[in-house]
Image: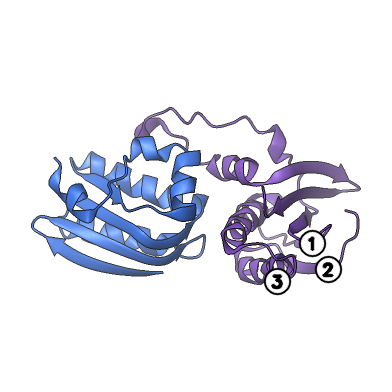
Chain colours: A purple, B blue
């Protein structure tokens, strides 16, 4: 992630959602993103972090998640979330069938769909035992 | 998130204020379950003052709607705005729960 300005390391669990959201929101304000984008940013952070908290690490094993952001230019925020859990590429997940009726709807899968819909330039890489998911959010995205 | 409850005839209107995220989606589910256990099977959820919903929130909405349907009732949503409206549109849950423009319209039909 070029030009990383700030990074935070947290325990990979649901309770870390608040501090992680607060941290990136600070970045979004520094980047002068409008409030509507800050709401979307919170959603992206929650979807990614909860996925890691629930599925990345074997139950009871614990683990960490890193949240980093940089401001490539005013009005733009680049975010990277890293974890050392099981290899998981959300971009490779098949899209959920959104035409199904209530009773047939799969209960999961919507989070990744929201992530793909709201994040600009979503990329994934596996690097030396780390899952690294990056995305951008900007005034115009 | 706060939940304000009003009874209108045999139906219950729940006005959600704040955010429905991973931390408090369960609160909504529990509140609805308590309405169901009191015998209410038609719930109207007013989302005008809900600023945020994540997939965990959607999961709770879907779970409650299924419970109500199994009892012959239903869950209706009204006054979706901003990010909440976008989330329902992107996931096409707005087709499963056709949004009503007002509490009155959600209460009237059916």
Instruction: Identify whether A126 is placed above or below A26.
Output: above
The circle drawn on residue A6 is 2
- Residue contact at pointers 1 and 2, CB within 8 angstroms: yes
Q: CA distance from mark 1 to mark 2?
A: 6 Å
Residue carrying label 1? A69
Instruction: Please state the horizontal and vertical placement of residue A117, each as a whole percent of the image.
Output: 61, 41
B23 left or right of B102 in image: right
Q: Residues within 10 Å of mark 2 (few under 14, many from 20)?
A: some
Q: Is residue B76 above or below residue B20?
A: above
Left or right relative to A132: residue A115: left
Task: Residue under label 3, please give it.
Answer: A26
Q: Indicate the quadrant containing the N terminus of chain B: top left, top right, bottom left or bottom right.
A: bottom left
The CA span between labels 2 and 3 is 10 Å
Task: Name the quadrant of the C terminus of chain B.
Answer: top left
Question: Hey, which quadrant is residue A36 in on the image?
Answer: bottom right
Q: In this orientation, which residue lies closer to the viewer: B65 or A60? A: B65
Instruction: Judge the density around disc 3: few (<14), some (14-19), many (≥20) Cα neighbours within 10 Å.
Output: few
Res. B11 mark: none
User: Circle 2 sits in a helix, a strand or a loop, which is it?
Assistant: strand
Q: Residue at x 74, y 51 (%)?
A: A136
Task: Give the side of residue A38 with respect to residue A92, left or right.
Answer: left
Where is residue A130? Give x, y as percent: 84, 50
* A96 in relation to B33, above or below: above
Circles 3 and 1: CB distance less than 8 Å?
no
Residue drawn at 15 percent across, 42 percent down: B109
Q: Give whichever of discs 2 and 3 has the lower sequence position.
A: 2
Disc 1 is placed on an element classified as strand
Q: Read off the chain for label 1.
A: A
In this orientation, does residue A57 appear?
no
């Amino acid at each position: 992630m070029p030009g990383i300005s700030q990074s935070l390391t947290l325990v990979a669990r649901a309770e870390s959602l608040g501090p992680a959201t607060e941290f990136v929101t600070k970045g979004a304000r520094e980047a002068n993103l409008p409030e509507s984008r800050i709401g979307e940013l919170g959603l992206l952070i929650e979807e990614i972090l909860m996925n890691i908290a629930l599925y990345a690490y074997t139950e009871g094993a614990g683990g960490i998640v890193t949240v980093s952001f940089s401001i490539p230019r005013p009005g733009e925020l680049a975010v990277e979330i890293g974890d050392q859990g099981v290899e998981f590429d959300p971009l490779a997940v098949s899209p959920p069938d959104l035409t199904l009726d209530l009773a047939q709807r799969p209960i999961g899968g919507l989070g990744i769909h929201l992530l793909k819909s709201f994040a600009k330039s979503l990329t994934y890489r596996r690097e030396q035992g780390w899952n690294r998911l990056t995305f951008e959010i900007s005034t115009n995205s | 998130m706060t939940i304000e409850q009003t009874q209108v005839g045999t139906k219950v209107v729940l006005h959600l204020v704040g955010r429905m995220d991973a931390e408090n989606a369960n609160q909504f589910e529990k509140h609805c379950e308590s309405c169901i256990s009191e015998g209410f099977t038609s719930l109207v959820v007013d989302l005008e003052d809900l600023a945020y919903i994540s997939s965990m929130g959607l999961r709770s909405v879907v779970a409650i709607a299924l419970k109500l349907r199994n009892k012959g009732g239903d869950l209706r949503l009204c006054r979706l705005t901003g990010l909440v409206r976008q989330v329902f549109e992107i996931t096409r849950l707005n087709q499963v729960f056709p949004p009503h423009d007002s509490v009155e319209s959600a209460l009237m039909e059916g």
